[in-house]
Image (spheres, helix red, strand yellow):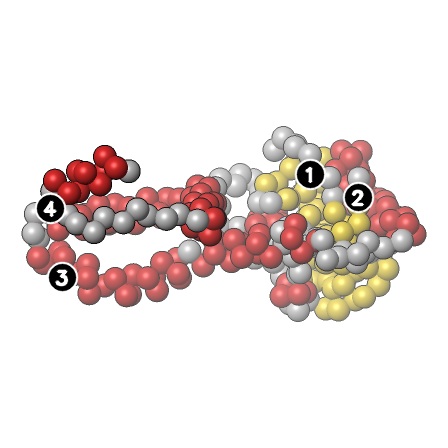
Amino acid sequence: MEVIKGVFDNLGVTGFVRPSIGFPDVLDILVVAYIIYKIIFWIKETRAWVLFKGILVILALAAIATILQLNTILWILSNTISVGIIAVIVVFQPELRKALEQLGKGRFFSYFMRTDAEDSQKASSRTVDEIIKAADKMGAVKTGALILIEQEVPLGDLERTGIPIDALVSSQLLINIFEHNTPLHDGAVIIRRNRIAAATCFLPLTDSNDISMELGTRHRAAIGASEVSDAYVIVVSEETGSISMARGGVLYRNLTADQLRTMLSQTKKVGKNKLSFWKGRQDK
């Protein structure tokens, strides 16, 4: 510090004061650095990364215009910056919503939730068995089906698009709902807390361009629903009878009943009577 002070004195700068850095300053720097890191990491895992690179190109253009004194370009950029902020919010709306959902379903809130008794765990295992039995039987006769199993993110907005059921999960009821030419067969079934909450629910279609052309609307809706929530979405193809499951925007295709059981059987209680499924890695 004495050397630095001497340099400032030689330059004619007086009143040099040694900066004091306390624990709050270090904590502040670490928190900001972590937030910036998480934002960059989150952007790179979404479609927002391509849009973000486009924004960087515009910022680079603004820097070049400033250096070269391109007044017209600077005037356009300065007068459109307020509109640009609104446009960024609109363009990144799906990604911002997903980020807030991930923040809301973090581990922090799980510490304030209480687990249920062991008999609730038995009910969860029974629910899994009934879902697998229904999917297997519907696949054998090529009956199309779409089943959502709610996790931490509530599916109330999707549930409101359908017809309330509020019935205990059973394979017979699921098969009857998706039977051809029945009033409830079109759309998705939402399962919450081991009960069928609603049927004929409409789901958002995925915007991804990486989806195989052989997949129809039912599979695209399953992927779309898994993109906007953490739900486990089971799909039975009406054309081939194959069973698939969408999770986190990824579709795992051509599953056997045993493979589906492996992915759904290991459950644990989170919150009030909710299913939290195994998160092992599967091939597409």
Question: Type of residue at label 2?
Answer: Thr
- Percent x, y of residue 159: 68, 65
Task: Looking at the picture, tell me which residue is in the foreground, 234 or 227.
Answer: 227
Mark 2 vs mark 4: give the one in front.
4
Q: Is residue 145 visible?
A: yes
Q: Kindly report the distance in space between the C-alpha atoms of the residues bearing marks 4 and 1.
A: 64 Å
Q: Residues within 10 Å of mark 2 (few under 14, many from 20)?
A: some
Q: Amino acid at mark 4?
A: Gly
Provide residue 9's location: percent of width, then percent of height.
15, 43
Q: Please give the name of the residue rendered at 66% of the width and 69% of the height, measured from the top-left corner.
A: 160
The disc placed on residue 12 is: 4
**Residue under the image location 67 percent in, 60 percent down:** 154
Of the numbered discs 4 and 3, the one sitting upstream in the chain is: 4
Name the mark on residue 113: none
Q: Position of residue 282 (x, y in %)?
A: 66, 32
Say which element carries label 2: loop
Is residue 18 or residue 242 the one in the foreground? 18
* Marks 4 & 1, CB-CB < 8 Å contact: no
Return the residue nearer the eye: 15 or 97: 15
Does residue 74 appear left or right of residue 270 in this picture? left
Residue 270: x and y, percent? 76, 51
Tell me the residue that label 2 is attached to.
267
Q: Which residue is mark 1?
A: 279
> From the image, which quarter does the C terminus lie in?
top right
N-term mark: 2 or 3: 3
Spatial CA distance of label 4 from label 3 is 40 Å
Please name the residue that numbered disc 3 is placed on.
75
